[in-house]
Image (cartoon, grey):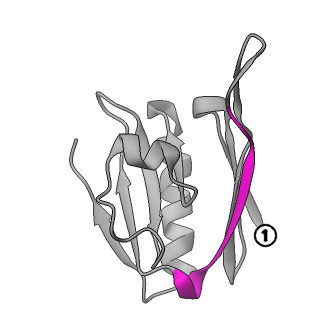
Amino acid sequence: MKTFSFKLFGGYNIDIDQKEMKIDYLGEKWWILTKAKPRTKIIPFGEISRVDYKEAGMTFGYVRLITNENEEYPSSTSVAQHDENAFMVEKDELAKLHEVLNLLKKYNKKIEFAQLKA
């Protein structure tokens, strides 16, 4: 199992093994106010039909795992920010983003990848 940490919007820990991916969102607090509650989502690779991703540029980057439950919503930064099957990426985390995408390609060759433009 390989673990990656991304720091945007409170932070994400991504665990990838040969059969599934775990997205652990750490939540976001501002002083004493909770802006977003922590959540964990485990997604088996067999459920993923497509991966939409956008590298950080003028806005934040993201990786959004498309499954049957969320395929009806078009991918965008604001949708990805609130989707349980997504995580957000900053500009200085692009090397980790590419490593996550390469592992997804390695473990499941049936997944389609779509790089979206800013």
What is the quadrant of the C terminus in the image? top left
- Using the image, determine if residue 10 lies above or below residue 45: above
Q: Please name the residue shown 72% across and 75% down the image.
A: 17
- Nearest to the observer: residue 56 or residue 96: 56
Secondary structure, mark 1, is loop
Quadrant of image for the N terminus: bottom right
Q: How many marks on residues?
A: 1
Residue drawn 58% across the image and 56% down it: 84
Q: Which contiguous range is marked in magenta? A: 36-47
Image coordinates for residue 14, horizontal then vertical, percent: 68, 56
Relative to 73, residue 76 above or below: above
75 falls in the magenta region? no
| Residue located beneath label 1 in the image | 1
Left or right: 86 in relation to 79: right
Q: Amino acid at mark 1?
A: Met
Q: Observer-nearest residue: 69 or 25? A: 69
Horizontal and vertical percent for residue 61?
A: 40, 41
Q: Residue at x 37, y 71 (%)?
A: 71
**Residue pushed farthest top?**
31
73 w.r.t. 55: above or below: below
Q: Quadrant of residue 5?
A: top right
Q: Residues within 10 Å of mark 1 (few under 14, many from 20)?
A: few
* Position of residue 10 measured from the top left corner of the image (x, y, whole percent): 67, 31
Which quarter of the figure has residue 11? top right
Q: Is 23 positioned to the left or the right of 80 in the image?
A: right
The image quarter containing residue 74 is bottom left
Counting from the top left corner in percent of width and height, residue 102 is at: 50, 68
Choose between 33 and 118: the one closer to the eye.
33
User: Residue at position x 42%, y 89% from top?
Assistant: 110
